Amino acid sequence: MKIMRYLEQKAQGMVEYALILAFVVGIAAALTSSDGIKGAIEATFEKVTTTLNTASGTQGGDADSNNPK
């Protein structure tokens, strides 16, 4: 009986490690995919940059270029 309990616990540990590995692989795939999370983050930063540049009156370059000193 002790041997069966040991084997069951060992199998449960292996399943847990397999699930963790699958989760890590899924996250890595999403981050490296161009259409995944990486693309969404890049698009968000691009929108924010465009909005900030429009609000400050510039279209790229230095934000102080329209404000002579």
Image (cartoon, rainbow, N blue to C red):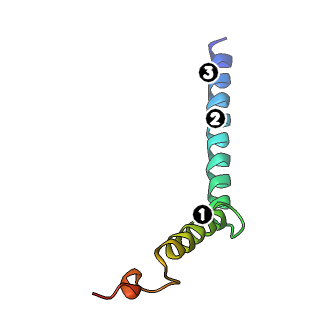
Residue underneath mark 1: 41
- Report helix, strand or loop for mark 3: helix
In the rendered image, the vertical position of residue 61 relative to residue 41, given as above or below: below
User: Can you give x and y, in whole percent of width and height, for residue 20 in the image?
Assistant: 62, 42
**Disc 2, disc 3: CB below 8 Å?**
no
Q: Which residue sits at x=63%, y=54%?
A: 27
**Mark number for residue 16?**
2
Q: In the depicted view, which residue is nearer to us: 24 or 3?
A: 24
Instruction: Compare marks 1 and 3 and give the one earlier in the sequence.
Output: 3
- The front one of 53 and 47 is 53
Q: Is residue 42 above or below residue 2?
A: below
On the image, the x and y values in percent for residue 21 come to 63, 47
Q: Which residue is mark 3?
A: 6
Label 3 crowd (10 A; few <14 / some 14-19 / many >=20): few
Q: Find the distance from the CA under tag 1 to the CA under tag 2.
A: 30 Å
Residue 24 left/right relative to 49? right
Query: Which quadrant of the figure has residue 18?
Result: top right
Between the residue at mark 1 and the residue at mark 3, the CA separation in whole angstroms equals 46 Å
42 vs 28: above or below: below
Q: Secondary structure at mark 1?
A: helix
